[in-house]
Image (cartoon, rainbow, N blue to C red):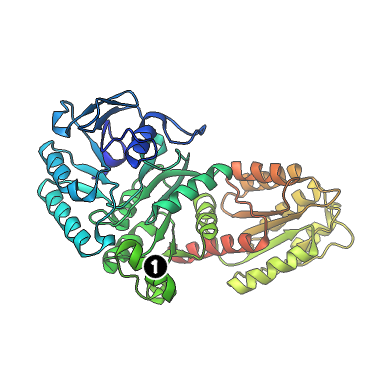
Amino acid sequence: MLENFFSPKSVAVIGASRERSSAGQGILRSLLKGGVFRSSTNRPFRGKIYAVNPKADNILGVKCYSSVLGIKGKIDLAVIAVPAKIVSKVMKECMQKKIHAVIIISAGFSEAGQEGKELEKQILEIARKGKIRILGPNCLGLMRPSSNLNASFGPCMPKKGDVAFFSQSGALIDSVIDWSLENNYGFSTVVSIGNKADLTAEDFLLWAEHDKETKAIALYLEDIKDGGRFMAAAKRVSAKKPIVALKSGRLETGMKAVSSHTGGLSGSYEIYKTAFRQSGVHIANSVDDLFEMTEALAHQPPCRNGIAIITNGGGAGVLCADHCEELGVKLTELSEHTIRKLDSSGKMHPAYSRSNPLDLVGDALSERYDTAIDTLLQQKDIYGLIVIQTLQTMTQPILDAKAVLRARKKYPGKPIITSYMGGKFSREAAELLEANKVPDFNVPYKAAKAMKALIDRYLWLH
């Protein structure tokens, strides 16, 4: 149903502009080059690109038409960036041209008062008559890296990955993409859903359910128009793929801001939290939370509640244990058999802790980490592992990371999450872990939070 949005063979930009700072030129430039800003992730769209502007002959080397009706070829997707008052006219032309997928970038609809609501109602009536699906209005557009498709005026194409991001805020998408390039985070799809006049978060959830490129879904929501439909869709999809949602407008000031931003009603956050939990949706409390939880859920298996912590710093281990208790993550007691194996390995320091958290002591080299990780994961009632490393003069970050990766391969059914605490001298090892789909966090709390998400996922599925 939505394939023309994500895999079009031809795209028309209606409202292409000669003004460099305009949305109309930004969209055209993004199709031609992959983005407005230069990035190694940018790729030009491989299909046909048409520009519509009755006052121009040529923009960025693309021939301009006065109307979509003047274009002879078939158009799979139209991106509209014209003033709100003439969008209805353009929609009628799209209907005549038999275009069935439309992105409306233009603002000035239901988020802008009663007159805007009437305009939105008009375009929706035209869409239904012409069997047109609408993304927007008042949106940034969408990006599909595997299709070399940046049908937006966002900064650039994100790296290809396996997390789908559906957001009610286009500006948030801009910043998230910039962040993702710095942090080597990839997306299968990014969609700005805007006012949701037609297509809603539920529609994109149901699409992502069957998308082979998507392993997990991140949502940023300000309001939900049809709670029952959202819950039904989320419950169905979360049985196959994890969903993490960040809901804004949680308190009174935020709720007022939501109303002015989208024209929608936010509603009690407690109601949203209950709905999310009943639908198997994980709840994020910040933007960092949203993508860190989604990354863990996309790349690590869910697990039962009962984990172990390995650390080379006692304080870090205690902090992590506190965070686990606060979050409801249980620490499994090390069995006598496990302790005997550690004692007899010849790799442990005489003063190692013999308990959970397992403190390997500050002089731990990779052989000690390797032995500890393997031994603890052999214990049947240890279902997951948090491995913490504090940077000390004898620490071997890369070799320790390789020990984690060996264990990840040997025990694919047990999640391993790491916390390489530090920065400059730990970065290479952290990047190695992340490149091999082991989530790494620079503070233990985030590692504990990610593990909690995997436990919650297990409980939902079972």
Asked if residue 222 is positioned above or below residue 374 in the image, the reply reads below
Q: Quadrant of residue 265?
A: bottom left
Crowding at mark 1 (Cα within 10 Å: few <14, some 14-19, many 20+): some
**In the shown orientation, is residue 363 left or right of residue 374?**
right
User: For the residue marked with disc 1, what is the amino acid?
Assistant: Ala
At 79% from the left and 52% from the top, the residue drawn is 391
Q: Is residue 266 visible?
A: yes
**What secondary structure is found at the residue carrying circle 1?**
helix
- Residue furthest out toward the right: 350
Residue indicated by mark 1:
257
Q: Is residue 441 left or right of residue 355?
A: left
344 left or right of 110? right
Q: Position of residue 437 (x, y in %)?
A: 57, 45
Seen at 43% across and 52% down, the residue is 171
Residue 64: x and y in percent read 24, 27
Q: Quadrant of the C terminus?
A: bottom left
Percent of width and height locating residue 169: 39, 55
- The quadrant in which residue 319 appears is bottom right
- Residue at 84%, 52% in the rendered image: 347
